[in-house]
Image (cartoon, coloured by chain):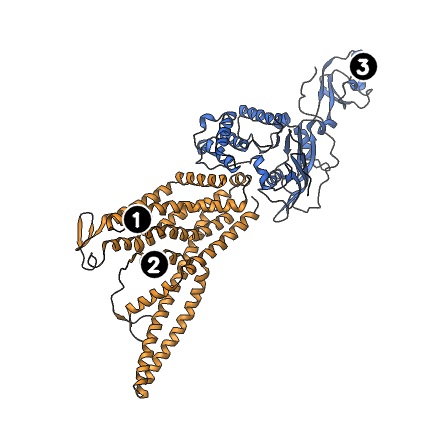
Amino acid sequence: MIQTLALLHAAYRELNARKLFWVTLGLSGLVVVAMAIVGLNEKGLTILWWQFDLAFLNTRIMPVDVFYKFIFAQLAVPFWLAWLATILALISTASIFPDMVSGGSIDILLSKPIGRVRLFLTRYLTGLLFVLLQVSVFTIAAFLLIGFRGGAWEPWILICIPLVLLFYSYLFSICALLGTITRSTIASFLVTMLFWLLVFGVNSGEQITLAGRTALDISLGYSQEDLQEAVDAEDPIEVTEPLQLLCDEDQQSLDTWESFHLWFFSAKTVLPKTAETINLLERVLRERTGMEVGGPPERQDMLFGASQQISTREFEEKLQETMDDRSITWIIGTSLLFEFFVLGLACWYFSRRDF
Amino acid sequence: MTQSSPLSIDLKDVTKTYRGGVFALRGVSLQVHPGEIFGLLGPNGAGKSTLVKIMMTVVRPTTAQGQVLGKPVGHNGTLANVGYLPEHHRFPPWLTGRQAIEFAGAMCKMPRKLRVRRTDELLDLVHMREWAKKRLGTYSKGMQQRIGLAASLVNDPQLVLLDEPTDGVDPVGRREIRDVLTQMREQGKSVLVNSHILSELELICDRVAILVQGLVARQGTVASLTSSSRCYEIISRATSELASTFDGVEFESLGEGRSLLRIPSDDPIAVQPILDRLRSSEVMIESVVPKRESLEDLFVRSVTDPSTGLALDPGANRSSKSDVRSFGTPSPPPPPSEPPVGGVS
C-alpha cells in the first residue's frame, strides 16, 4: 500500500509539474463558463445580456433543465471531454510509460521490492489519474451549473466521470502498450491516435450500415404490406408483380446491407466501443432523468436506396431502439475485454523485458 | 531447499545471452562477504552492469545460481534490504531532493515517519540539506549523484550496489563518498562498487574482481592479485658487471652512470645481501623502494591478450559461448610503473 500511495503521490506531483494539466483544466473551466453564460427563456436563447428570439428553441419547447442537460450530454461531453480534452490528456500522459522504461529511471523502480506487473498497473492507474481529476472537476462544475441554472439537481450527471474514465482507459491501454514497446512518446501518441481513428472508422461504418439496414428493413416492411394488401384485394398480376419486384429489390439490398453490417459489427465487437461508451451518458440521462429532446421533424424521405419513401421519425426511432437494445454489458464488457487483453499483453512484455 | 549462504553475494555460473547471440555473461561466479567493499572492474561492455542489474532484477539472467543476502538471485523481497545506485540514474526532474529520497524509501515500504527521519540524516550525510527543497532539474550532475547515493541508502541496506558512484562528483565529494562507504563497511554492511576510477577503488576496496568479456578474469584482494609483481628497486651507481653477479636481479641503465636494480621479491631480507655488496663495493645508493603493481597495471594486464600483447576488444563476446578465453594462467606482470606507497629512501 505504501508503494502504491507513493506512486500515486509521485504521479500527482508529475501532473502538477505539467503545464498542460493546468491548461486543460483551465479550458475545462472555460467550457463550463461558456455553458453558464448561455440561458433559455420563453422567447429564446440568452447569452449574457443579449437576447436571441428563437421560435424553435425556447422554454415552451424545451424545459431549461433539459436544455442544460442536453448541452452537457450532447455538446460538452462528446466534443470537449471525449474529443479535445482527450487529445490533450493523451499528449500529457503519452510520456508516462516511455519515461518509466527509459534508462536510469526503470533501474531505480525495478530495484525496489515491487512486482513488475503491479508496478506497471499502478503506473497505468496514475495515467488515468489525469483524466479522473479533469473529468471530476468538469462534471462537478456542470452538476452545480445544471442545479443552479437549470434548477435540476441530477446526481446521474456524475455518471459521466466513470464513463469518460472508461472511454479514456481504452485508448490509454494502447498508449501504455506502445510506450512500453517503443519507448517513444511520439510514436505511442501517434499510433494511439491512429488506433482511435480506426475505432472511429469502424464505428462510423457500423452506424452507416446499421442505418442502411434499418432503412431497407422499414422499406421492405412497406413493400410487403403493399403486396399483402394487393394479394388480399386479389389485384391482378399486373399490380402484384411490380410490388413483388419491389419487395425482391428491397430484400436484395437489405441482404447486402446486412452482410456489410455484420462485418462492421463483428469488428466493432472486438474493438473498444468509444463512441457508444460516451453515448451511454445520454442514454442514462434519458432513462433516469427523463431528458427528452424530441425526435426529428416528421417527413418522408428516400434513404439508403430504399425502393420507397420512409418515415424519418420511424427510421430514427427504430435506429434508436436498436442502439438502446445493445446492453451495457456488451458495450462496456467487450471493451473492457479488449482493454484487459491489451494490458495483459503489455504486462507480459514488461515482465519479460530486460532493461 | 537451498541452504542460506552466509555471504552477502554468492553467485555461481551466472550467464546472460542477449538477443542476437551476444554473450554478456558467460558463467560468472562471485563472492562478496559481509563487511567488505568489493570492486567490480572491467573494460566497457565486459558485463559489469549486466551482472549488477541481474542482482537487482532489472535484467533476467539466462542461467543463474547462487544467492543475494541468503535468498535466490531474483528474489523480489530481498530488494528491501539492498541499495542500488544505477549508472546515469534519472529521478523525475520535478521532484525535489528530499522527495526523491523519500520516494525511494516509500518504494522500499518504509513507514512515513521512519523515511522522513532517515531522509534528514542522509541529506546531512551527503551535504545536500540546503538544496533539499529544490527540484532535481536544477541540480548539477554531482549534486544529483549525491541525492542518488542518499536514495540508495535510505532503507539502511545490508548490501549496496553502486554503479559509478563518483561520476561527476568533485574531489571533496569523492572523498566524502569514500568515507560513507568505509563507514558502511565498519557497520558490517557489504558494498559492491562498479567503477572505472581504479585509483579510488584501490583506496577502499578489500577485494576486487576483474570482468573481461563476460568472465571473471581475476578475483581476490588487491594484495594477493599483485603479489607476483612485488619487488624492490634499488637506484644506485652500480655497473652491469657488478649487477651480473647477483642472481635473478634485473639491471637497467638510467644513464649518467645511474642504474636500476630490480629484485623480484617482497621480502626485505632478500635485499640485504645486495645492499651489503653495493656498500662494500663503495657504490653510492640513491634509493631503495618496495614496489608492487598498481590496480591499474593489474587491470591493463587482465584485459591484454597474452598471445598478442594487445588489449582485448571491448564489449561482449559475440562469437560463441564455448569460445572462452582462458584466464587461468595470467600473463607475467610488467615492470611496475606506479610510484610506491610508502617508499624507503
Q: Which corner quadrant of the image does residue B229 belong to?
A: top right
Disc 2 crowd, CA 10 A, few/some/many (<14, 14-19, 20+): some
Q: Position of residue A163 (x, y in %)?
A: 38, 53
Q: Given the image, what chain letter belongs to the residue carrying mark 1?
A: A
How far separated are the C-alphas under marks 3 and 2? Answer: 109 Å
Given the image, on which type of amino acid does mark 2 rest? Arg
Chain B on-screen colour? blue
How far separated are the C-alphas under marks 1 and 3? Answer: 105 Å
Q: Position of residue B86 (x, y in %)?
A: 55, 36
Tag 3 and tag 2, C-beta contact below 8 Å? no
Q: In the figure, A202 relative to B121: above or below? A: below
Is residue A298 shown left or right of residue B223? left
Residue identified by numbered label 3: B277
Residue identified by numbered label 2: A283
Residue identified by numbered label 1: A143
How far separated are the C-alphas under marks 1 and 2? Answer: 17 Å
Chain A on-screen colour? orange
Q: Is residue A124 visible?
A: yes
